[in-house]
Each structure stands twice: as structure tokens, then as C-alpha cells.
Image (cartoon, rainbow, N blue to C red):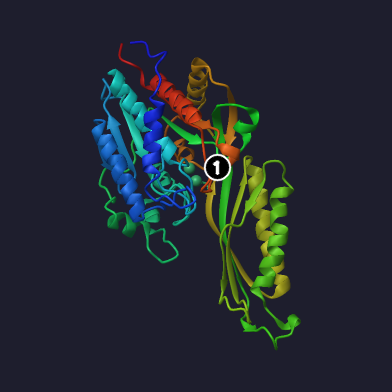
Amino acid sequence: MSTRNLRVDGDRLWASLMEMARIGATEKGGVCRVALTDLDRQGRDLFRRWCEEAGCTVRVDPMGNMFARRPGRDPSRDPVGTGSHLDSQPTGGKFDGVYGVLAGLEVVRTLNDRGIETEAPVELCVWTNEEGARFPPAMVGSGVFAGVFSLDYGHSRADHDGKTQGEELARIGYLGDAPLGHAFGAYFEAHIEQGPILENAGKTIGIVTGAQGTRWYDVILTGAESHAGPTPMELRRDAMAGAGEILAALYRIALDRPPHGRATVGEFRLHPGSRNTVPGRIEFSVDLRHPDGPTLESMDADLKALVARVAAARGLEHEVVDIWLSPPVAFDAGCVDAVRKGAAALGHEAMEVVSGAGHDSVYLSRVAPTGMVFIPCEGGISHNEVENATPADVTAGCDVLLHAMLDRAGVVA
Ligand code: GLV
Ligand code: MN
Ligand code: MN
């Protein structure tokens, strides 16, 4: 059967996205569906029901990753996978992650509507805790699947209240028993770009050639609590004064490596948090990114030297805890080409891009030929409740995903 003119049902995909967005909906129009909360469970349950209604068999592995399989003609072939994540940032949007999951579901629904049989099975994936917002690091579910992290490591990651991922997976009923790790013939992920490149260039499709590298840290500065009034400035060991000096210089680590260097401090905790006590302890997160591996390593060295220098000058103890390193990756040339061909066949304006964000595909690419499809998001804004994408772009990205997957899975004549 010719699938050349095959298109997904964009209205149905949009309706599913909006229905899923009601789970954890925020007043400002975004979504708060943080990993392994009751809302995450509700999102997973809805996805499972939709997959079963579409005739898929759903399995869950011990890291809570979900796999919904549509059989192919040849059961001996490894499946062509697709998916993303259903967890969100605390103030997240309606598209980050969930778009890739529901685009995969729309591919399966479209194949069902047309009675199309693929040679290889097709498998929809939901990866646990991609965001890393509650349990750092990011991409833990796909990382355990790909053997980057052990299952013990995944289960033992804890949130600020000391609750672990293993406990929370069991609590929400997603500590599964499917075998951990299996092969894919190819893997594709559709995602909003989360940056401004496609919109500024007037393109509909991003052919993602790889992803930049990321390093996460916790910086801990320890001084001494003392009274805000009687303690002379020169006698203080003020953790806040040290943090201020570090922050003033930290952004230069990225700014001095234009245009790709990135530095973000997104979490900040000070103790004891009393207005008339000199803070004795500060903890803050640092996220450094660059597409070039050696440059990212030089940023790492600069951060560690900066913290050591300021701490020594101010009589503070310091720790820079390495939380996560995700090196830059290049995706599989064949999968990148399948995305390129799909966009061209459908007549979409497309360009090659390197992902600025981390994605489960980064870890999938260690165990399977992998590619990604990006679509623009309004103003390039993501990790924000106003995150938005147009129905036309959402549909176009899903059409390209469909064609890339069929290219790899093969269609029974
Ligand atoms: C994932 O959202 C990331 O931090 O890039
Ligand atoms: Mn995402
Ligand atoms: Mn995200």
C-alpha cells in the first residue's frame, strides 16, 4: 500500500493534548505534573487507557518506563520506538514532553484507521522523570533503560523531602516488572524546539542532528552564623556574601563562550533564612551547557576554580558536587535522514538544528539508532506556563514523525 500521501488526524492529536493538559492544569494556562506525583499517575493512567483502546499491549519496567506495542508482521524484528515524557516542570507548559508521547499515539491511531500493517512492531514509550526537577538528574528513566545509570541509582534518587523515586514509583503503582532494557530497530522523538531558532528562521520542522552537553552541580558554601548587628563586616564568614561574589562572575563562564555557552542558577537555598542572622550555609544549583565537549569541560574547570577562589578569600568551606554530566551527542545519520526525507516528502520548510535541551533521545541514542523532529514553539518559550505551539505545526511534526517511522518500520504491501 502506498503511504506517500498519508497524514495524521491533527484535530484528534490536538484534542488529546488538550485533554492531557487538564491533568495538572494551572491557573496561568500551563501544567504542573511533576514526576511521580498523583498527577503523574493520572497522566500515565490516561495514556495507558488510550493505548489499550488503540489495541496496544502496555508494559511497565522497574524504572516506571511505559511501553505500548503495536505488533508488526514480523515479530522477530526489533520495534521502531517513539515517545517522550509525561512529567512536567513545576511551572511547565502543555507541550514539553507530552507532545512526543501523544504524537506517537496519533501515529498508531492513524495506522489503525487506515488498516496499515508495518513489518516491524511500533512501540510508544513514556520515560520516567525526564525533567529532573523533583529528583535530579534529568532523563533518569531513559538513562536507566540505556544502562547509563543503574536501577539502584535510579530508585535511590531523592527529592528535597527525602522521598525516593523507588518509593514513589511503588506508591503510584508504576514499579513494573517488564525486563529492563530491550532493543529498538530505530527510535524517534517529536518535541517542541524550546528555543527561538525555527520561529526566527520561519521553518516548520527542525531536523535534529544532535544535542548539546549539560553539566549539573550543587554548590555548597559553609560559613558561620552570627548576629547581623554586633558582628563587624571583616569578622564575618558570610555564605551569602560568597554566593553573591560567585554569582557575579559565574555568568561570565557562559558569556565568554558566545554564542552557545549557557549558565543557569535555578535553585537557591539559604540557611537559616532569618533577616538578622548572617547566613551560615548556602546551597545553589548550577546548570552549564555547550555543544562542544572540550569547551564544556573548560567551563567545568572555570566553575570549580571560581568557587574555590571565592571561598578561600572569604574563609568559607566549599563543595562543588557533580550531579550530572550528559556529553554532547550526534544522532544517527540514517535516522536524521529519515526525518529529512519525511519533511521533504510532505513539503515542509525544514532546517538542521542542534538541540539546546536534554531529551530522552540523548540516552536512547546510546542503544539505538535515534533521531528527533522539532517544531517551533511561540516566542521560543518553554519551561513556562505560557509555552505554546500552533495546531498546524503540531500536526506537521507528527506527519514527519509518521513518515520517518514508516521509513524504518517498513509497510506491508
Ligand atoms: C530538560 O528539560 C533539560 O534540562 O534540558
Ligand atoms: Mn522535554
Ligand atoms: Mn523540559
Displayed quadrant of residue 187: top left
Work out whether residue 92 or residue 386 is closer to the camera in this orientation and state it. 386
- For the residue marked with disc 1, what is the amino acid? Ala
Q: Is residue 275 left or right of residue 14?
A: right
Query: How far across and how far down the image is residue 377, in percent?
Result: 55, 36
Crowding near pointer 1: few (<14 within 10 Å), some, many (20+)?
some
Instruction: Say if residue 81 shows up in the picture.
Output: no
| Residue displayed at 29% across by 35% down | 68
| Residue displayed at 62% across by 40% down | 291
Is ligand 1 less than 8 Å from the beta carbon at label 1?
A: yes
Query: How far across and how far down the image is residue 35, in percent?
Result: 40, 52
Q: Is residue 120 above or below residue 200?
A: above
SS of the residue under disc 1: loop
Work out whether residue 262 or residue 90 is closer to the camera in this orientation and state it. 90
Q: Quadrant of the C terminus?
A: top left
Displayed quadrant of residue 73: top left
Q: Is residue 64 left or right of residue 231?
A: left
Instruction: Say if residue 198 shows up in the picture.
Output: yes
Work out whether residue 267 or residue 148 is closer to the camera in this orientation and state it. 267
